[in-house]
Image (spheres, rainbow, N blue to C red):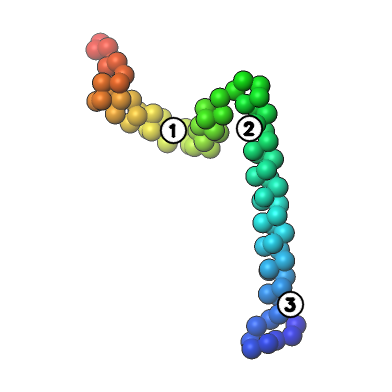
Amino acid sequence: MSDVNGIAQDQLKSFVDRIERLEEEKKTISDDIRDVYAEARGNGFDTKVLRRVIALRKQDANERQEQESILDLYLQALGMAPAEAEE
């Protein structure tokens, strides 16, 4: 490797090339995801809800349950959801 001012040029160029290639792949994948959402929308699916489903599937079950419980509590406090029936 050749050094210029203490920088390994070959290694630096390799990093830059790899990053550029990955950035291009990321753009391609983002475009593909956008196309799938457009296809889903074209078939009558609500893409906002679909995105929420994807986000929920990424969460741990316990984390999801905790968030749902807090959301229910907030909605009840704001009068936006019926209070649970007392047993």
> At 63% from the left edge and 32% from the top edge, which residue is drawn?
37
Q: Is residue 78 above or below residue 29?
A: above
Judge left or right: residue 9 versus residue 65: right
Q: Secondary structure at mark 1?
A: helix
Amino acid type assigned to the residue bearing label 3 in the image: Asp
Q: Earlier in the sequence, mark 1 or mark 3?
A: 3
The reply to whether residue 57 is in sight is: no
Question: How far is the residue under mark 2 from the one under mark 3?
Answer: 41 Å
Q: Secondary structure at mark 2?
A: helix
Question: How far is the residue under mark 2 from the one under mark 1?
Answer: 23 Å
Residue under circle 2? 37
x then y, percent, for residue 72: 33, 25
For the residue carrying disc 3, how many other residues have a C-alpha within 10 Å: few (<14), some (14-19), or many (20+)? few
Q: Nearer the viewer, mark 2 or mark 3?
A: 2
Residue under circle 1? 64
Q: Earlier in the sequence, mark 2 or mark 3?
A: 3
